[in-house]
Image (tube, rainbow, N blue to C red):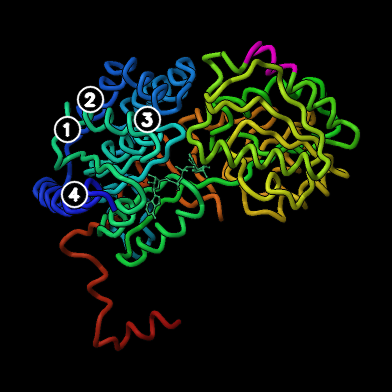
Amino acid sequence: MSDLDSKQIERMSAVFQAQKAAFEGERHRAYKDRIRDIDAIAALTVKHAEAIKDAAASDFGVRSRCETQLSEIAYMASAAKHTRRHLNSWMQKKKVAVPGNLKPGNAYIRREPKGVVGIISPWNYPFQLAFSPILAALAAGCRVMLKPSEFTPAMSDLMKSMLAEEFDENHVAVILGGPAVGEAFTKLPYDHLFYTGSTHVGRIVSKAAAENLTPVTLELGGKSPVIMADDFPAEKAGETLAFGKFLNAGQTCIAPDYVLTPKGKSRTVAESTIARVQKAYPDWATDEDYTAVVSDKHYERLNSMIEEARSAGAEILQAEGSDPGNARKIAPTVVLNPPEDSRLMQEEIFGPVLPILEHDGLDDAMKRVNAKDRPLALYVYAKSKKTARSVLEGTISGGAVVNNTMLHYSVEDLPFGGVGASGSGAYHGEYGFETFTHARSVFETPVWHPSRLIQPPYGKIFDMITK
Ligand code: NAD
C-alpha cells in the first residue's frame, strides 16, 4: 500500500465522523438548500466543461471530446434540470388509504434522507457515473463520500477540486485511491452504499456492506445481448449497432455485447456494422472521435480475446485504418461465430469487439441468453410489436430497448439498474431520490381513537372480533 493510500485511509474515518455529526445537526435538509446543491452541481458541470473534456482525454489517451460532451456533460446538465423540476413533488408526503376499522386517521409516507452515503465509481464514464449518484444523494438531503476510480486520476483530481469549490468536506468529500482504499472505504458504516463497477468487485462490496447491515445499490456489468428477429431488415442493423458498440470504444456497461441473428443473416449484419463504423471513422487510428482503450491491461485483454477467437477459426472483420502506434487503440472489430466457450462469449467484453452469431429461431436465442447471467440490458430488433413483446416476456434483464441500443439510459423517468448478477437497486430521476431516502410510514390518529377500545380485559370484544 502506498503512503498516499495509508493517508487516505486514515483521513476517511475522520471525514465520515464529521459528516455524521453534520447530518445529525441538520437531519432534514430544507427544500431550498437541496435546490442550491442541485444548482451547484449543474453550475460546476457547465463551468468546468472544458476541463472535464481535457481530463477524460488525458486519462484515456484519446477520448472523443464530443462523446464526453454528449455522454457526461450534457447528460449531467439534463439530469440536474430534471431533478430540480421534480424535487418538490418527490419530497411531498404521499397519502395512503386508511382501512375502515382504523379510522379516523391519516396515513402517509415521508421520504427522509438516509444520512451519510458512500459512492464508489468506475473509470469508463468517470465524471457522469460519479456526479449522477451524487446529484441523487444531494436531492435526497444526504451527505456524500465519493471514491472514484484510480484508473482515471486526472478526472478524480478534477472532481475533488470542483466539488471543494461548492461543498464543505462534511457535506461532499472525495477520497482518492485504488482497491486498498476502496476496501477500507466500504467498511465504514454508511447509511447507504452505492457501487458502480464489475460484478467481481460488487460481490466484495456487498459482503463488506452486509457486516454493517448497510443497504447497498449495485450497478454492475454483464453481457448485454441483441436478439434479432426474422422480420428485422438485417442490412439496417449496423446503423444502431455501430453507435452502441463503438461509442467510447465499447467501454460502456450497456454496450451491446453480442448479437444473435436469424440463420443466414450474420454476415449481412456484420458487413452493415463495419460499413457504418467505417463511415463514422474513415481512419479510426487517427480519428480523435474514436476513443482509446483505457489501460494496457484492458488493451492486452481485448487483443488476446480477438486472437483466441481467430485461432479457433472465427472470421474477423475490422474497419480499415492506419497504424495507431502505441495509442492503445483497437480497430472496430466484428467476430463472426466465435465458439460458445471462447472468452468473447464467456466474459463481458467491454471494448470495441462485437461477436455476431446465428440462432435457430427466437426460442433458441432466448434459451441461450437465459443460460447466461441476467444481463444489464437486452436489445430486441423486431418489426413486429408482438414478436418484440414475446422476447421481453421470455427473458429477464435490467433494462431493454426495442429496435435500438442504450437509449433507455437517457430517459430520466425510467429506473436504471441491473438484475441478478448485473446488479440490484436502481437510480435516475425519482428512483435515485428513492434510493437515498427512507420511506418512513406515519399514521396519525386523533387523541381519542376507537382503537383504545380494543385492549384487555377483552370480554365482549373477544366475542365481537372472533365472530
Ligand atoms: P471495478 O470494479 O474494477 O472498479 C470500480 C471501482 O471499485 C473503482 O473505484 C475501484 O477502485 C473500486 N474497487 C476495486 N476493488 C475494490 C475493492 N476490493 N473494494 C472496494 N472497491 C474496490 O470496475 P471498473 O473496471 O472500474 O468498471 C468496469 C465494470 O463496471 C464493467 O463490468 C462495467 O459493466 C461496470 N459498469 C457498470 C455500470 C452500471 O451502471 N451498471 C456503469 C459503468 C460500468
In this view of the protein, can residue 67 be seen by the observer? yes
- Determine whether the residue tagged by mark 3 lies in a helix, strand or loop: loop
Of discs 1 and 3, which sits in the foreground?
3
Earlier sequence position, callout 4 versus callout 3? 4
Q: Is the residue under label 1 in contact with that under label 2 (CB below 8 Å)?
A: yes
Which percent across, then down, holds residue 213?
A: 32, 65
Q: Main secondary structure of the magenta part?
A: helix
Which percent across, then down, holds residue 69?
A: 43, 18
Label annotation for residue 7: 4
- Determine whether the residue tagged by mark 1 lies in a helix, strand or loop: loop
Earlier sequence position, callout 4 versus callout 1? 4
As displayed, is residue 245 above or below residue 444? above
Of discs 2 and 4, which sits in the foreground?
4
Crowd rating for badge 4 (residues with CA inside 10 Å; few <14, some 14–19, many 20+): few
Residue type, label 4: Lys
Residue type, label 3: Phe
User: How far apart in space, not on screen, are marks 2 and 1 (Cα)?
Assistant: 9 Å
